[in-house]
Amino acid sequence: MVTPGHIRQQLSRARSSTLRGDVMSGLQLLSEAGLSEFNGEGYGPILSSGISYEKGAGAPGVTVKRVRAGVLVPLLMRETELTVLLTRRHDDLNRHAGQVAFPGGRMDPGDADQTAAALREAEEEVGLDRNAVDILGCLDPYLTITGFEVLPVVGLISDPPKSFLPEPNEVAAVFEVPLSFLVNPENHQKVRRTVNGLERAYYAMPYEQHYIWGATAGMIVNLSEVLNTP
């Protein structure tokens, strides 16, 4: 089992931080062979941005306003294993509706940095006490196609509550996934799909009734790479 000590050690190792993102991952995956065809049966609507890769944030020559944001990657110390807390956003939100996501959001004027934003948003979205989070380190920044430059902050909750309090206007569901499942490369699908004539490619890791994909899956792949580096 991966231990908190190992996670902290791996995150603290010197590594070249690469700006990851929807466009970078999408273009790279589209150049590869053997991608799986999208099958969203049973997962409900899987919405995607209507922005083409050529016009999205991170595309060569494209300049857009970048909005700094932070998400918390909450690792919960349960009795037998570490789990990862995830949310599913409401279907009627303006941005990233219906998608599985880490708790988090854009920086507010009162936030000292992206880590503070991640902790504040996690407290607001799922009722997680920010003082109960032990920060283990950060993953690489992730740029969404819509221009959010997201810092994923990995935090350990040693004594997690049995249940959480989702913010009713934003969070439709809160659930946990074993860390061992998420960081196993065998569970990382590479998917191709066409949305309104736009070809997309992304990582996905379906778990039970939840379809984890896109930016969230891309951050999990980054975590897997960090933890599996010798």
Image (cartoon, rainbow, N blue to C red):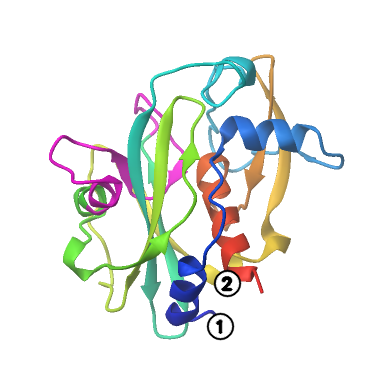
Under circle 1, the secondary element is loop
Residue shown at 56%/40% (left/top)? Answer: 214
Q: Which residues are magenta?
A: 91-119
| Location of residue 163 in the rendering, given as x and y in whole percent from the top left corner | 27, 66
- Where does residue 212 sit, x and y in percent of width and height? 55, 48
Establish if 29 lies above or below 184: above
Judging depth in this view, the residue of 99 and 8 nearest the camera is 8
* Residue at the spot of label 2: 180
Q: Nearer the viewer, residue 61 or 127?
A: 61
Q: Amino acid at mark 2?
A: Ser
Residue 82 is drawn in which quadrant? bottom left
Would residue 34 be found to the left or right of residue 95 on screen? right
Residue 148: x and y in percent read 41, 31
Q: Distance of mark 1 from mark 2, alpha carbons?
A: 7 Å
**Amino acid under disc 1:** Met
Dividing the image into 4 quarters, which one contains the N terminus? bottom right
Q: Nearer the viewer, residue 31 or 98?
A: 31
